[in-house]
Image (tube, grey):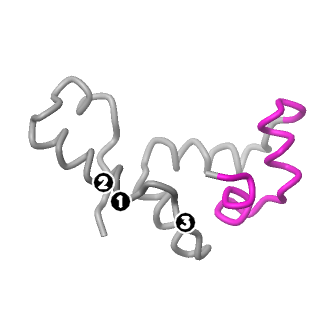
Amino acid sequence: MTQQQASKIFGKGLIAFSRYENEDSCPDTSPRLLIELAIARPDILKTLADRANVTIPLWKERCEDEKRMMAGQCPAAASTRAPITHE
């Protein structure tokens, strides 16, 4: 995800995400919690991205990987990722 996409999804400026990425500053509490929630629950990230009209790179591929893991084709990895909603 680009800084521009992240700024649209999470409602912070492009410069803010550049500073976060370069570790020049840290997000305030609200955006930090929202980012943590989106990481833990990819379905929430997808909802936020859809509302911001942002396409998440490789979303379809991730959903396909998730389906394979849930089908038991990669059981070790299945326990390490949060389930996602498929659209």
Disc on res. 60? 1
Specify the amino acid type for callout 2: Cys
Disc on res. 48? 3
Disc on res. 63? 2
Mark 3: secondary structure: helix
Q: CA distance from mark 2 to mark 3?
A: 17 Å
Q: Residue at x 21, y 23 (%)?
A: 76
Residue 38 in the figure: left or right of residue 31 = left
Q: CA distance from mark 3 to mark 1?
A: 16 Å
Q: Nearer the viewer, mark 3 or mark 1?
A: 1
Pointer 1 local density, CA inside 10 Å: few below 14, some 14–19, many at least 20? few
Q: Residue at x 16, y 42 (%)?
A: 70
Specify the amino acid type for callout 1: Lys
Between 83 and 3, which is closer to the camera in this rendering?
Answer: 3
* Magenta range: 2-25
Q: Residue at x 25, y 29 (%)?
A: 79
Mark 2: secondary structure: helix
